[in-house]
Amino acid sequence: MSPKGKSAGKKAAVTRKRNAAKHRATAEKTALTRRRRAAGKKAAATRKHLAAGLKAARTRTRRATARKAAATRARKKEAALTQSVQVQEPPAPEPQVQATPETSIPE
C-alpha cells in the first residue's frame, strides 16, 4: 500500500473517532437533560400537590370557622330572645297589719 493511501486511511479513522466522540458527548448531554427535565417535572408536580393540599387545608379551616361563628351567633340570638320574653313578676304585696291593742296602724 502506498504511503498516501495509508495516511488517507488514518485520516478517515481519526475523523470517525472524532465524530463518534462528538456523538457520545451529545448523547450524554441529552440523557442528562432528559433526567434533569424529568426531575424538574417531578419537583414541579410535588410543589403543585403540596400547594393544593395547603389550599384544601385553608378552605377546611375557613369553613369550620364560619360554621362555628354561625353557631355562636345563633346561640346568642336564641339566648337574647329567651331573655327578652321573660316577664317581670309584680312585687309581692305587703302583708296587711292587723290592729291589735299592742300595735298601732301606721298612717
Image (cartoon, rainbow, N blue to C red):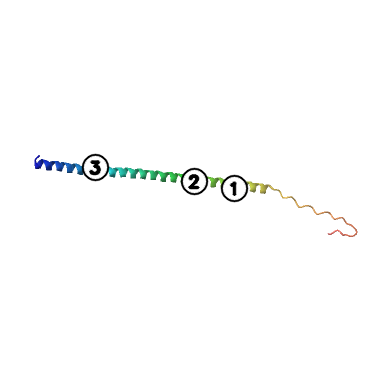
Q: Nearer the viewer, residue 34 or 95?
A: 34
Give the quarter of the figure containing the C terminus: bottom right
- Which amino acid lies under the numbered mark 1 shown in the image of this protein? Thr
Q: Is residue 21 left or right of residue 96?
A: left
Label pair 3/2, CB-CB below 8 angstroms = no
Circle 2 residues within 10 Å: few <14, some 14–19, many ≥20: few
- Which amino acid lies under the numbered mark 3 shown in the image of this protein? His
Q: Nearer the viewer, mark 3 or mark 2?
A: 3
Q: CA distance from mark 3 to mark 1?
A: 73 Å
Q: Quick one: SS at disc 3?
A: helix
Q: CA distance from mark 2 to mark 1?
A: 22 Å
- Which amino acid lies under the numbered mark 2 shown in the image of this protein? Ala
Kindly identify which residue carries mark 3.
23
Q: CA distance from mark 3 to mark 2?
A: 51 Å
Q: Residue at x 59, y 46 (%)?
A: 71
Label pair 3/1, CB-CB below 8 angstroms = no
Q: Residue at x 52, y 47 (%)?
A: 61
Which is more N-terminal, label 1 or label 3? 3
Kindly identify which residue carries mark 2.
57
Q: Nearer the viewer, mark 3 or mark 1?
A: 3
Q: Residue at x 12, y 41 (%)?
A: 6
Quarter where residue 7 is shown = top left
Kindly identify which residue carries mark 1.
72
Quarter where residue 38 is shown = top left
Q: Position of residue 81 (x, y in %)?
A: 65, 47
Q: Is residue 55 left or right of residue 23?
A: right
Q: Nearer the viewer, mark 2 or mark 1?
A: 2
Give the quarter of the figure containing the N terminus: top left
Q: Quick one: SS at disc 2?
A: helix
Q: Residue at x 28, y 44 (%)?
A: 28
